[in-house]
């Protein structure tokens, strides 16, 4: 379950580290088993331009976690790329 991969701080703030693949063949959230531990991967069909891919990632993760994609949480924090 995706919510099992959220890292919670004592302040009640959670973070989820994901790897995003833009221009994929399908929109999906999946958890890969790796030797270093489970890894969350988000595939989106849109290109990484004008924040379209970021918006699609937020939409997919919100749906997977059962949250509205207009949730007041800070989803707009700058994203770090590899």
Image (cartoon, grey):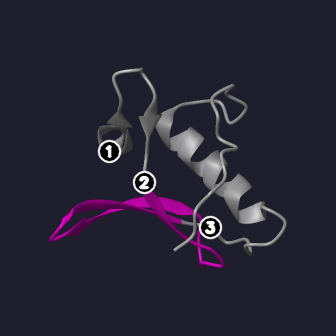
Q: Are marks 2 and 3 in contact (CB under 8 Å)?
A: no
| Residue at screen point 46% across, 28% down | 13
Closest to the observer: 28 or 79? 79
Q: Are marks 1 and 2 in contact (CB under 8 Å)?
A: no
Q: CA distance from mark 1 to mark 2?
A: 8 Å
Which span of residues is magenta-colored?
A: 17-42
Name the residue carrying label 1. Answer: 5
Instruction: From this view, report whether residue 16 is shown above or below residue 36.
Output: above
Q: Quadrant of residue 20?
A: bottom right
Q: Earlier in the sequence, mark 3 or mark 1?
A: 1
- Indicate which label's residue lies in the foreground, 2 or 3: 2
Left or right placement of residue 77 versus residue 36 in this view: right
Closest to the observer: 43 or 16? 16
| Residue at screen point 15% across, 71% down | 35
| Residue at screen point 73% across, 73% down | 48
- The x and y percentages for residue 50 are 84, 66
Name the residue carrying label 2. Answer: 17
Q: Quadrant of residue 53?
A: bottom right
Q: Are marks 3 and 1 in contact (CB under 8 Å)?
A: no
Q: Earlier in the sequence, mark 2 or mark 3?
A: 2
Secondary structure at badge 2 equals: loop
């Amino acid at each position: 379950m995706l919510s099992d991969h959220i890292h919670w701080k004592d302040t009640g703030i959670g973070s989820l580290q994901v790897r995003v693949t833009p221009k994929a063949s399908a929109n999906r959230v999946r958890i890969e088993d790796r030797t270093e531990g489970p890894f969350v991967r988000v595939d989106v069909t849109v290109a990484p331009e004008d924040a379209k891919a970021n918006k699609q990632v937020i939409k997919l993760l919100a749906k997977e976690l059962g949250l509205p994609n207009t949730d007041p949480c800070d989803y707009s924090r700058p994203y770090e790329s590899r």
